[in-house]
Amino acid sequence: MREFNEKRLLRRVLFSWGSVLIVGTLLFFSVRGLVSVYERYAEARKLREAAEGRLGGLTERKDTLQAAITSLETGRGFEEEVRERFGVVRPGEGVIDIVEEKKEEGATGTQPSVLEWFLKLF
């Protein structure tokens, strides 16, 4: 009988309002802390993705600049860059500019299709 009373007392203490309130409070603060940690994790993940994107862009830029430096180290690359930037030529060279004539729309001589004519009405 004594064991029965001890079990009954234990159940009464464990399932009392006070112990349920204590367990509920602990659960509330645990969940609140978990949500806070998750929010920080999500923010850190976004910042990491942004940093990785910037790193990719900077790596690409580094490769481009490295290729340009390598090109400038050769005589031909240096000459090409000077000609492109400053528009200079060697003595005795000439420059030929090829300009294409612009064709006017009405001068083509083709008539608009039926669909184009219908769309022009609206």
Image (cartoon, rainbow, N blue to C red):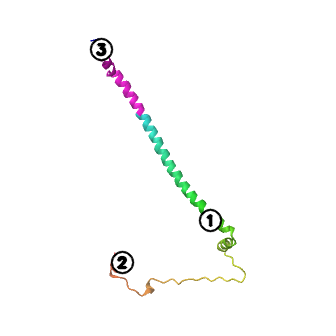
The secondary element bearing badge 2 is classed as helix
The residues bearing labels 1 and 2 have C-alpha atoms spaced at a distance of: 51 Å
Circle nearer the viewer, 3 or 2: 3
Disc nearer the start of the sequence (1/3): 3
> Horizontal placement of 95 versus 10: left or right?
right
- First of labels 3, 2 by sequence position: 3
The kind of secondary structure element at disc 3 is helix
Q: Quadrant of the C terminus?
A: bottom left
Is 76 on the left or on the right of 23, as rendered? right
Residue linked to disc 1: 67
Hey, what amino acid is under mark 3?
Answer: Glu
**Mark 1 falls on what kind of element?**
helix
Q: Nearer the viewer, mark 1 or mark 3?
A: 3
Q: Residue at x 40, y 86 (%)?
A: 110
Magenta region: 7-30
* Label disc, if present, on residue 120 of the rendered structure: 2
Q: Is residue 73 above or below residue 31?
A: below
In this view, 117 is above or below 64: below
